[in-house]
Image (spheres, helix red, strand yellow):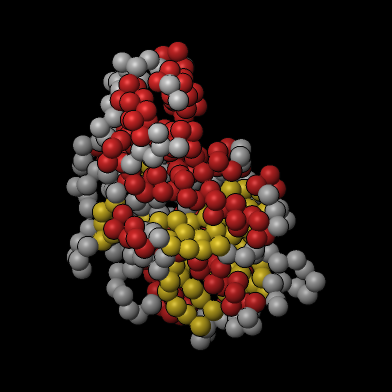
Amino acid sequence: MTGSKILAFGGYQPDRVVTNDDLAKVVDTSDEWIKARVGIESRRIAADDETVTDMAEAAGAKALAASGLAPSAIDLVIVATCSPLVPMPSVSAVVAHRLGIVAPGAFDLNAACAGFCYALGTAANAVSAGSARNVLVIGAEKMSSWVDWTDRSTCIIFADGAGAAVVSASEEGEPAGIGPVVWGSAGDQASRIEVTGRTGAMRQDGQAVFRWATTAMAPVALEACVRAGVTPADITAFVPHQANLRIVEAIARKLGIPRERVADDIVHAGNTSSASVPLALSRMAEQGRLQPGTQALLIGFGAGLSYAAQVITLP
Amino acid sequence: MTDQEILSGLAEIIDEIAGVPADEVTPDKNFVDDLDIDSLSMVEIAVAAQDKFGVEIPDEQLKDLKTVQDVVNFVSKNS
């Protein structure tokens, strides 16, 4: 079986910065309250005419350029998103066309905030199965178009952005650079995070989700380590979905991973759902916080409830 | 488990999660008003209490547990 590896990451954030003070003018909240509860200082919100497809294209272009591969080398494009403007056509087919990738396999995948880790696992499996050789994996979201801007429990959390990775087949004899994905779901708790009705806004039972994430996700992350043959002590970068800084810190504490190895991109990016993991990775790469050749642990979790985790070797 | 044992176990948990010194955790203290503990920390405390005492404190119950004594009573009654 062919192994797979990540060649490069890319990220894109909209230009518009929205601070906590900006939000305090719209809903009853404060900078202090938001920082204490979710750890966010500012977030990026897309322009009115900026779509998930636009953001996916921008992040995909960066990852593709950084990978050194020509667009023609990509034979599969997967976009994880739960907030596209329209349900069809797929974001992935349009993005592939815009990037000059000719006739790749292309589909969107919805596992909400766990989407990128699901897509990465699916990409690795496609390479292993021989269905693809080089895969562009993107997480892109415009959560601002689905939140209720009068609901202070959610509108302060969610934000917009995109992140991408290029996955390629490993060389012969090279160890696999993407470990087995550990994924699952808890549909009995589907109503904890949902959009009701076709034009409805997103609702979240924050306390219940917080309890679930801080108790159920550390064991999933540990299982991903076991499946990859590493321990949390081997992990040089822990990149959980940037849901809430307190959830991030609680999971890291349970795994015994020191703070300096933990992604805290939420502080200036907000919760960008399926984009948060690759966006954090691309920023950490830019900041020189990723050590090539060492192991990173990724975990996504959110609506569904659904979750997925895997260990990767950093490019 | 005596109430005193529950209280000292709870004080250890609150120290670890919220950084409140154990000797400040006395029965009459209100979590929000006296100890500055918010609802998310209460969830973490409830989860840690479940691990320590084997008593589950569901979210629906949690909102009614306002003081340290309330939690001690709940654990004592359900253990």
Specify the quadrant that holds the C terminus of chain A.
Answer: bottom right
Q: Residue furthest top?
A: B23
| A75 is higher (above) or lower (below) than A258 | below
Q: Which residue is drawn at 26% across and 61% down?
A: A195
Residue B35 x %, y %: 36, 20
| B47 is higher (above) or lower (below) than A164 | above
Q: Residue at x 65, y 47 (%)?
A: A232
- Would residue B67 be seen by someone viewing this image from the given angle? yes
Residue A197 x %, y %: 20, 66
- Would residue A266 be seen by someone viewing this image from the given angle? no
Q: Residue furthest bottom?
A: A103
Rendering quarter of residue B26: top left
Residue B9 x %, y %: 47, 24
Q: Which residue is drawn at 31% across and 15% down?
A: B28
Q: Seen in the image, is B6 located left or right of residue A199? A: right
Q: Seen in the image, is A308 located left or right of residue A285? A: left
Rendering quarter of residue A19: top left
Number of dots carrying numbers: 0
Residue A279 x %, y %: 50, 55
Q: Which of A234 and A14 is in front in this view?
A: A234
Q: Residue at x 28, y 37 (%)?
A: B61
Specify the quadrant that holds the N terminus of chain A.
Answer: bottom right
Q: Which of A43 and A88 is in front in this view?
A: A88
